[in-house]
Amino acid sequence: MKNALIVSKFGGTSMGDLTAMDRSAVITLERNSTLVVVSATSGTTDKLIQIAKSASKGEIEECEKLVFAIKERHQAMINELPKNQLAFECLQSYFTEIDLLVQNISLLKELTPKAHDHILSLGERMSSLLFREVLQNKAPNKKVLLLDARTIIKTDSNFGKATPLINVIAEKCNQLDINCLYVTQGFIGSDMDGNTTILGRGGSDYSAALFAEGLKANVLEIWTDVAGIATTDPRICSKAKIIPEISYAEAGEMAQYGAKVLHPATIAPAVRQSIPVFVGSSFEKDLPGTWIKAEIQHRPAVRAITKRSNQTLLTISNPNMLNAYGFMGEIFDLFGKHRISVDCVTTSEISIAVTVDNTTLENTDFMQDLNLVGKIDVETGYSLISLIGNDLFSRSNLAKSIFTCVDETSIRMMSLGASSYNFNFLIKDEESKTCIQKLHSTLIEGSL
């Protein structure tokens, strides 16, 4: 696309080592990207999370081992690059920052949300420094600038999962020189007081979309280790196919209900500015990939099947609410207060059942608040299977085909009707693989 303003994002595997970075640099230059958003090198964020937890418990030896592994990996990478004293000193300053954070956390034996976000930011800050060097060495005549995402991606102060301030981000993006090539970090931002924040796990896609929205980009590219968005997880079903194009609505539903390729929040900024999104593999850059657009040609009844594992069913009951009002409002106020996402909901006169991630049970404050509303039944060991498609509840004979596929499956809960793009049902984890294979065989194979 000639003279297009392109924002490109590369995931952790695309930053995994210098060979992967070199492939990503080739793509960046071939596509003539204006701004590149990168994740931490693969596995680094997990190590940083463990370092923070171990430091808060005073487990110094475990911390030292993990910190050494991170330093060794990034030091080895910069040592292989042409020498740049400024970059070398910057990397050493990041190492010092890790040491000081670990020291402070272990001394206090307390991991504050603010300290947690700060230590996690170092993964992206290190990888972006290295990738900037790779790009500059590959294109010595090009002006490649390292941009601190925290100066642009402004958020509220909800550490751990901050909310972006869209209008402020747009103002900051207007100050960038689109004639330069910027390398910046995904996942991180800062509040209006300058404290480092993170957008939550998987937030690098979201960061890229926010940059694309702020810059009014022509295209947002998401480069990962798979060749596009598949009809289902290829590890579950060997006959899964890459989808050539998909609508914003379908992609949003897929991301929300378990597709690993995109972060659930990614689509919203693209929709607001009608920015086409391309998803492709940095390892096989010439494959066609998947385009996500507002308007598409092919609209099958069932486009894809997704799975969200580790689901819990919470049933909140209170007989006193029979013919009363405000029961659901009170419950959802609690979900909002504790910033907990609900996937599916069904109701009766005196109870409401919701599916949530298993980690919700670790939020003791939320569970205590919920127990004040009514009796709580907790059921674990479920997966949420979602059929993503078009006009699902107006397609004749579709229901018959679906229920024929799942006739031997123990369905605990179903949700259909809130959206014409998805049909969800909750089943036991151990039944999910066979169920998806049957649904894919009947509803998708041969239809693309």
Image (tube, helix red, strand yellow):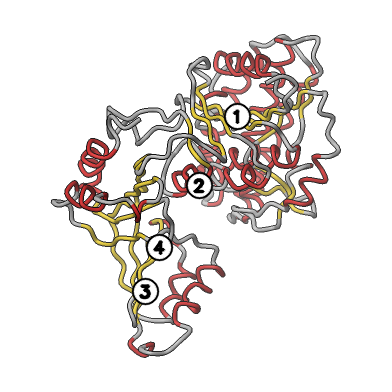
Q: Is residue 99 above or below residue 409?
A: above
Q: Mark number for residue 361?
A: 4
Mark nearer the viewer, 2 or 4: 2
Q: Mark number for residue 41?
A: none
Instruction: Check disc 4: other Cα within 10 Å, few if <14, some if 14-19, many if 20+.
Output: some
Q: Mark number for residue 249?
A: 2
Instruction: Check disc 3: other Cα within 10 Å, few if <14, some if 14-19, many if 20+.
Output: some
Mark 1 to mark 4 CA distance (whole Å): 36 Å
The answer to whether residue 148 shows anywhere in this view is: yes
**Mark 3 — residue?**
352
Q: Which sits earlier in the primary sequence, circle 1 or circle 4?
A: 1
The answer to whether residue 68 shows anywhere in this view is: no
**Mark 1 — residue?**
221
Give the residue furthest to the left: 408
Q: Is residue 395 above or below residue 143?
A: below
Residue 236 image offset from top left, x and y in percent: 28, 34
Question: Residue 230's image quarter?
Answer: top left
Question: Residue 124's image quarter?
Answer: top right
Q: Which sits earlier in the primary sequence, circle 2 or circle 4?
A: 2
Mark 4 to mark 3 CA distance (whole Å): 17 Å
Tell me which amino acid carries mark 3: Ile
